[in-house]
Image: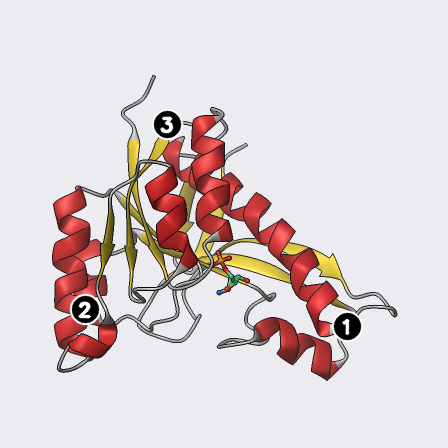
Amino acid sequence: MSEPLRVAVLVSGSGTNLQSLLDAAASGDLGSARVVGVISNRPGAGALLRAERAGVPALVLDHKSFADRAAFDAALREGVTSLGADLVVLAGFMRVLTPVFLDAFAGRVINIHPSLLPSFPGVDAQGQAFAHGVKVTGCTVHFVDAGLDSGPIISQSAVPVRDDDDAETLRARILVEEHRLLREVVRDLAEGRLRREGRRVLRRP
Ligand code: GRF
């Protein structure tokens, strides 16, 4: 068994992507990856209850209690470092990270985004896609850089938009696929299946 890949998960909301990773680790479906800690920028995030139920250490860094973005990112960097994380997963995390944080974890921060980037970056990607009238949307896992949902794409999954969809039914269908895609990428990273060639990320079968 390879050394466990120590994963810190950053959250802001309900934490269904976190729950998916916790469940996969518990059922042996995440390779050698283990969630070693959860950090939320919102004290009331439902994800914190999920971490508690799973017995995973959780830390709240309320971004509103920091003087500026750099101070928050410095505290976040210390929090992740204290967990001894090898990989940082942004799972419904709603803050843009600066080099103050990113430079300490170069190439080891990934994000799950609910659209086929580069289409529909930013907030409410599902609603943007629905309003635009696309016939196919989906989700993307990418490495995080200092831009907005702009880092090298690791993996994507397409989700059809149905004529009888509304924004909520579409959001729910994408979310199921997000859970599957994020589990697959974390497992691939734990098993050393991914390598980068410039902006391209290649997967060894
Ligand atoms: C997900 O669609 C995620 O992509 C977006 O927020 C939604 C909720 O995520 N950023 P979670 O349930 O908190 O994991």
Near-viewer residue (11 or 97): 11
Can you tell which quarter of the image residue 134 is in?
Answer: bottom right
Image quarter (top left, top right, bottom left or bottom right) of the N terminus = top left
Is 34 placed above or below 18 here?
above
Residue shown at the point (58%, 76%) measured from the top left: 120
Amino acid carrying mark 3 in the image: Ser
Instruction: Describe the element under mark 2 as helix, strand or loop.
Output: helix
Earlier-in-chain disc, 2 versus 1: 2
Question: Would the CB of label 2 be found within 8 Å of ligand 1?
Answer: no
Q: Element type at marker 3?
A: loop
- Nearest to the observer: residue 148 or residue 62: 62
Q: Residue furthest right?
A: 163
Q: Look at the image and tell me whether residue 185 can be seen.
A: no
Residue holding disc 1: 166
Picture coordinates of residue 33 (x, y %)? 36, 33
The alpha-carbon separation of the residues under discs 3 and 1 comes to: 38 Å
Q: Amino acid at mark 2?
A: Asp
Q: Residue furthest top?
A: 1
Earlier in the chain: of badge 3 and badge 2, it is: 3
Q: Label 3, on which residue?
A: 32
Q: Which dot marks residue 73?
A: 2
* Percent of width and height locating residue 176: 63, 50
